[in-house]
Image (spheres, rainbow, N blue to C red):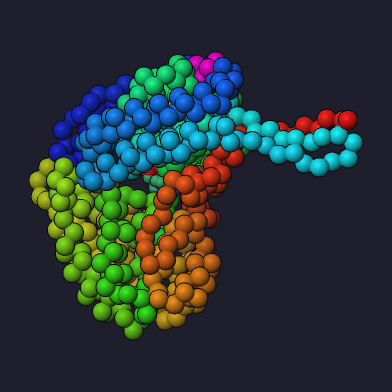
Amino acid sequence: MKIINPATEDVLADVEPAGRGETDRAVARAKAAFPAWRDVAPGDRARLLRRFADLVDRHAEELAELELANCGHTIGNARWEAGNVRDVLHYYAGAPERDFGRQIPVAGGVDITFHEPLGVVAVIVPWNFPMVIMTWGVAPALAAGNTVVVKPAEWTPLTAMRLAALALEAGLPEGVLQVLPGAGEVAGARLVEHPDVRKIVFTGSTEVGKQIAATAARTVKRVTLELGGKSANIVFADADLERAAASAPGAVFDNSGQDCCARSRVLVERPVYEEFLERLERAVAAVVVGDPRDPGTDMGPLISADHRDRVASYVTGTPRFQGTCPAGKGFWFPPTVLTHAALDERAFTEEIFGPVVGVVPFDDEAHAVRIANDTPYGLSGSIWTENVGRALRVARAVEAGNLSVNSHSSVRYWTPFGGYKESGLGRELGPDALAAFTETKNVFIAH
Ligand code: NAD
């Protein structure tokens, strides 16, 4: 697999993809490593994870630069991502000693529950936030005592491979965390069907997620699915319009729109619709698209030429307005704002996964909620209003897993993250993540 820098089109590396046989060998190594890893004393497992986190911290700049080169992430974002990997590892390093069960009152004896690891867990990762998304699965899985095989996306395996090496250096035993670069249809598909893999954590497209759920059903494999999104940013007339407009580009164009949580549908209450668009136009004009290494850059390139073509296919007529982007080498696309004559236009209903946003007016609260929910997705969203009652009503009414009021934040490693409807199944991060990597065993002991 030729690994390309999307900002320059230079070849960064040549990586040998794992075939079916290599995938089976990785699963066998993970299975063999499991009993000893499960039996590592909780405090020792915690210490190893903390050492891993500390090594990530020491190599944070290197990891950030690798992600910048492989994905075109801006240097600011890439540094945040390396810090997030460290923090997620530290957070779940606190879990092994706290992964306790319960004692439940019963007649004639004692009833206790245990949380036991599943065995081999496979984490299948997309290309948009490679090291971060990998770690959201890996850290709680390891903390709970599972062994892990990671299948990074075809285009972006470099930080995953580096993290696996750092894990070994930190003292994690061989076979506990392996990274297996390879094709989705080969290595990924084999992990999903493999009888010795007990759980799949998949982040990626809804289409592939559905296939994975169907295949996993054959072996009753546990699955966590983090899938696509088409999230709504709902702006009421009583909102702080300047803040809402100034922050809207970041909420959809961050990471060049290649973000499952992108607020790619902006719904604006009709009396302030035109005023909002004027302010948004100024904010979009100020978005700096260019060299991701420059700290002043807001947005880098798209991941590949194919993906750029796919994004461009959604912009058929004349956009309402567009920002600028570099010409020449690199997979560039300008921030683009569309308005829609009809709500069933493809660009307003499908996940574009690029820097394209659709803006539409709404009449009242019920209308806004109806538009926001008129999608198979349900990942995130934002609500802008100064009316706290309305903020809570709308937050409860929108069918999505991660909502923010007067802000666009979706992700904190210590709060749960995941989707409603076809945006996913299960939750990652937060205090309960270990539940997705353990079985509950109930034991009754007669007096
Ligand atoms: P994708 O579904 O094409 O690929 C994701 C991963 O699955 C890759 O590693 C790929 O190799 C692998 N894969 C592909 N086919 C497979 C198969 N048949 N069996 C097993 N594995 C297979 O997605 P992508 O294009 O890499 O990522 C973009 C998508 O990911 C978008 O839809 C985006 O919304 C979604 N995403 C969701 C979240 C979330 O948390 N909800 C986060 C990031 C990205």
Residue 324 appears in the figure: yes
Is 395 displayed left or right of 275 in the figure?
Answer: right
Identify whether 52 is placed above or below 325. Answer: above
Which residue is at the front of the view, 115 or 68?
115
Identify whether 336 is placed above or below 294. Answer: below
Residue 30 in magenta stretch: yes
Residue sitting at x 20%, y 69%: 281
Furthest residue in direction bottom, as rendered: 271
Is 79 displayed left or right of 121 in the figure?
Answer: left
The image quadrant where one finds the C terminus is top right
Question: Where does the image place residue 57, in percent across and percent down from the top left?
Answer: 32, 33
Q: Quadrant of residue 360?
A: bottom left
Q: Which range of residues does the magenta coloring cover?
A: 28-33
Residue 429 in magenta stretch: no
Question: Where does the image place residue 303, in percent across and percent down from the top left?
Answer: 26, 42
Question: Where does the image place residue 244, in percent across and percent down from the top left?
Answer: 31, 69
Is 222 displayed left or right of 25 in the figure?
Answer: right
Ligand 1 falls in quadrant: top left
Residue sitting at x 14%, y 58%: 324
Q: Quadrant of residue 436?
A: top right
Question: Where does the image place residue 201, in percent across and percent down from the top left?
Answer: 50, 37
Furthest residue in direction left, as rendered: 328
Q: Quadrant of residue 15?
A: top left
Which residue is at the front of the view, 10 or 429?
429
Residue sitting at x 36%, y 76%: 239
Residue sitting at x 28%, y 34%: 60
